[in-house]
Amino acid sequence: MIAERKDAHVRFATEQHRRHTGHNQFDDVSFVHHALAGIDRSDVSTVTRFGGMEWQVPLYINAMTGGSPKTGEINRDLAIAARETGVSIATGSISPYFADESVADTFSVMRKENPGGFILANVNANATVEKARRAVDLLQADALQIHVNVIQETVMPEGDRLFASWGPRIEEIAAGVDVPLIVKEVGFGLSRETLLRLREMGVRVADVSGSGGTDFARIENDRRDRPDYSYLNGWGQSTAACLLDAQGVGLPVLASGGVRHPLDVVRALALGASAVGASGLFLRTVLDGGAPALISLLSSWIDQLTALMTALGAPTPADLTRCDVLVLGDLRAFCDGRGIETRPLATRSRSCGTNGSSTHHETIGGS
């Protein structure tokens, strides 16, 4: 039953991404062009540091799947691509392993194929400390993700209906595991209030994972006999909105959800993300062309990311938070409604005196 659900998730997610090519709120973020801001490419480093971790590139393959023979093959290809490009990678939810240990290799294949890489294990918010430790051990994981997905569970026919324990469970796991803990949404976004609460719980990093990419409300609705919850399609805040909402929370944030190309990666970094992840596009790439296709795509993204940092005068990913950005359209309306001041973002390089090629400025993401 669980394996069938995991295969269905892959099928519906792939169909969704093949249909969706339009606008999302990353398009409401644009850089002010400064023609003399560029630096030498040799001076650019893609290394990012946050929450006691160091990644060679501020890009990661986010949680997708596992738990069936087909998804195990997908995880193998994803891990090979991560190994060859140096990007970090997360497994899908390891819940199927807790129900049936015979599917262990559909997850552990990631470590087998990527022995020296940075791998994040993934559990749900109902997991006990014991299960969290088992997940880390299964992958020899470098970090642990806990995903929160109340809207997905609500629409899922067989989903959880008990959510009151999630907060206490997260706090217990934060204190009970020996690797960094990252709490992530699954595409509906983390609000400022949620981020502040997570910080109080001892969570080290949060992945805002906003709307604009894979819509799990739509996926679970497609799995129902009747599309009773179609009105929830598009629920939540966009990734860009979440990043702006996160200003000053004092918790490093990652960004995923609706990331379509390297410019979206740079936009997210400029809005305060320490690293940026994607799932749907990478999944579609692997299904179409296997590990070689994803290696090619990731290599191209890293090259283009470096090129954009060079043009914007940002020697490190964190320096992108000193670049001037304009926030327009629906995203600006969200900020107005939440009382978020966006005008200073358009002139922040002035405080450095060099139109984007400065050496000091406080980042907006608290990372």
Image (tube, rainbow, N blue to C red):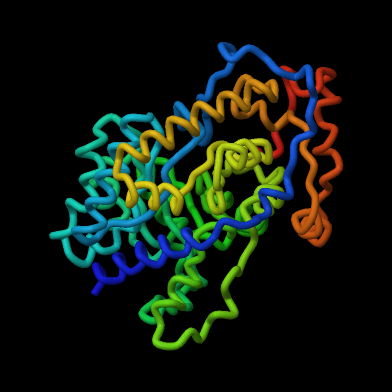
Q: Which quadrant holds residue 110?
A: top left
Image coords of residue 64 (percent x, y): 37, 54
Against 349, residue 164 (above or below) is below
The quarter in which the N terminus is drawn is bottom left
The residue lying toward the viewer, choosing from 253 and 256, is: 256
Looking at the image, residue 69 sits to the left or right of residue 336; the answer is left
The residue lying toward the viewer, choosing from 129 and 88, is: 88
Image coords of residue 258 (percent x, y): 56, 53
The residue lying toward the viewer, choosing from 172 and 261, is: 261
Q: Residue furthest left?
A: 102
Q: Which quadrant holds residue 316?
A: top right
The quarter in which the C terminus is drawn is top right
Q: Which quadrant holds residue 236?
A: bottom right
Against 42, residue 124 (above or below) is below
Which residue sits at x=71%, y=45%? 247
Which residue sits at x=77%, y=38%? 325
Which residue sits at x=35%, y=65%? 11
Residue 228 at least partly seen: yes
Image coords of residue 184 (percent x, y): 49, 54
Looking at the image, residue 254 sits to the left or right of residue 116; the answer is right
Against 327, residue 113 (above or below) is above
Image coords of residue 244 (percent x, y): 71, 48
